[in-house]
Image: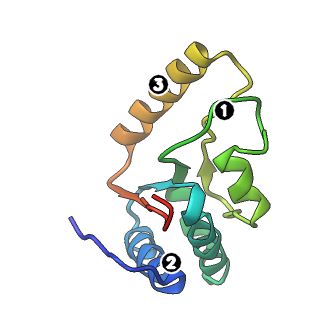
Amino acid sequence: MDIQTTTNIEEVAQFVANAILEKLRSQKRVLFFATGGSSIAVGARIAEIFRDEPEQNIFKNLVVTLTDERYGKIEHQDSNWKQLLDKGFAINNAKLIPVLIGEDLETTVKNFSKNLKIELQNVDYKIGLFGVGKDG
């Protein structure tokens, strides 16, 4: 396990992006857990770094989901997924798995749990971005 501790957005983004790119370039399948809150800017920067990658086809082996989400309607104003997308989080060829699916809480949890179990079994490498903002 490798833990990076810093408040510099660029350092964190480069660290996470490089770790993922290293695995993807060696044809490993990667599951990336993005997060919300104060780390949304980091996730958006990671996506920018990925857009500069010459070989965009490697992202077919990348799956992205969230470490946390605020339940509600799809794209509600407090949704971490919506906030990431609004900041420009987009990765060509990657499989993106939002938590919210427009169903009740119980169905949403069951669906996400099922999808997460499948993805955890199908990847070679898992990496999570976890952040605690200055307010927490």
Above or below, 45 against 116 in this view is below
Residue type at the position of mark 2: Ala
Residue at x 75% of width, y 66% of height:
87
Expressed as whole percent of the image width and height from the top left, the position of residue 114 reads 46, 24
* Label 3 element class: helix
Q: Residue at x 33, y 76 (%)?
A: 5
In front: 136, or 22? 136
Q: Which residue is mark 3?
A: 114
**Which amino acid, by three-letter code, is at mark 1?**
Leu
**Residue at x-position 44% and y-position 68%:** 24
Query: Distance from label 2 to label 1 (Cα)?
Result: 25 Å
Q: Is residue 51 left or right of residue 17?
A: right
Q: From the viewer's side, name the closer residue of 15 and 55.
A: 15
Label 2 belongs to which residue? 13
| Quadrant assignment, res 60 | bottom right
> What secondary structure is marked by label 1?
loop
